[in-house]
Image (cartoon, grey):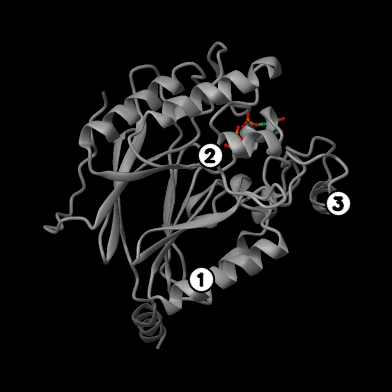
Amino acid sequence: MGSANVLASAHGKQPLFSFGVISDVQYADIPDGRSFLGVPRYYRHSIVVLKRAVQMWNDQKNHKFVINLGDIVDGFCPKDQSLNAVTKVVEEFEKFNGPVYHMIGNHCLYNLPRKQLLPLLKIPSIDGRAYYDFSPTPEFRFVVLDGYDISAIGWPQDHPSAIEALKFLQERNPNTEKNSPVGLEGLERRFLMFNGAVGKEQLEWLDGILQEATELKQNVVVCCHLPLDPGASSKEALLWNYDEVMRVIHRYNCVKVCLAGHDHKGGHSIDSHGVQHRVLEAALECPPGTDAYGYIDVYDDKLSLIGFDRMVSTDMQFNPQSDFREKQHQIRL
Ligand SMILES: Nc1ccn([C@@H]2O[C@H](COP(=O)(O)O)[C@@H](O)[C@H]2O)c(=O)n1
Ligand SMILES: O=P(O)(O)OC[C@H](O)CO
């Protein structure tokens, strides 16, 4: 089993609670391969990484829940094996002695339609949408976004979300292969078919949740398979309307941390409003014998990610936003 990457800063306090994290398992019972850009992918080993993660979370006994940041199976999984592969990975997650909160990624949707996938992942859903929130303690709220709400994958072809997504891509990506960013400049490189957007209704729901969390003085952690900040991710991996989502988030002071997957190399940034963004390193890209998973210790003033092996440990201090804005203002003067 891999070793924890120790953080330099000692906090000296007991965490309020802890939870396990893992992303992009992308399991398939197929030989090792590579991404389009040539990065090795270990489709069979990734479930071994998950098994070691579950064992570690259970052995440590103090993790209240686990968050899976999406893409549990790979798109190259033969379609007649999709259901078996999803079931096999879900069964591994269910060996964790506590609740597991899943979110969908593009690879999940290459394998199974939403109506089959969401019940297997126990994702609460209205009309096939996969966004929800939960509160593990009165002081904290976790918001899980559906980054493929507007998407050209996962919906029946005649579904309004699929039609809207295809129109969106036609207007922004001139390539016949809509996963190709060739010719797209800067942040436009996110307009690819393997990404998606948060729809209007979901944005309104998010706004309502953040308003309520503000009234309840809760700290909020937003989770989405697709990254929400260009500082933490490749441009090609961002949510299409990350800017719209962040405008909603920045209206409030309650969101302290955003967690994501999808961009397998991982990343970390602090945005202009002091919100921490952490994109988690993929389990899929761990060569045999190595790991990428971790757990997050939650304090009243920060989240501390303790990563194993390829998952980098990260201290994510909460920003008392009014102070942060004041300091930014003073720096500019
Ligand atoms: N620079 C790129 C990256 C990807 N593609 C297309 O997307 C597909 C999925 O990419 P992976 O990184 O998951 O392998 C890939 O098969 C290409 O069709 C691209 O065109 N240009
Ligand atoms: O997980 P994939 O195969 O969709 O890859 C996503 C890319 O890494 C985003 O840049």
- Quadrant assignment for ligand 2: top right
Q: Which residue is mark 2?
A: 70
Q: Residue furthest top?
A: 31
Secondary structure of the residue carrying numbered label 1: helix
Nearest the eye: 244 or 55:
55
Q: CA distance from mark 3 to mark 2?
A: 25 Å
- Judged from the image, the secondary structure of the residue bearing numbered disc 2 is loop
Q: Which residue, as the protein is rendered here, is positioned at the far right?
A: 158
Q: Amino acid at mark 2?
A: Gly
Which residue is the site of mark 1?
210
Q: Position of residue 190 (x, y in %)?
A: 67, 49
Quick check: is the Cβ at mark 2 less than 8 Å away from ligand 2?
no
Q: Position of residue 214 (x, y in %)?
A: 44, 76
Crowdedness near tag 3: few (<14), some (14–19) or many (≥20) residues, C-alpha within 10 Å: few
Of circles 3 and 1, which is in front? 1
Residue underneath mark 3: 167
Q: Disc 3 or 2, which lies upstream in sequence?
A: 2
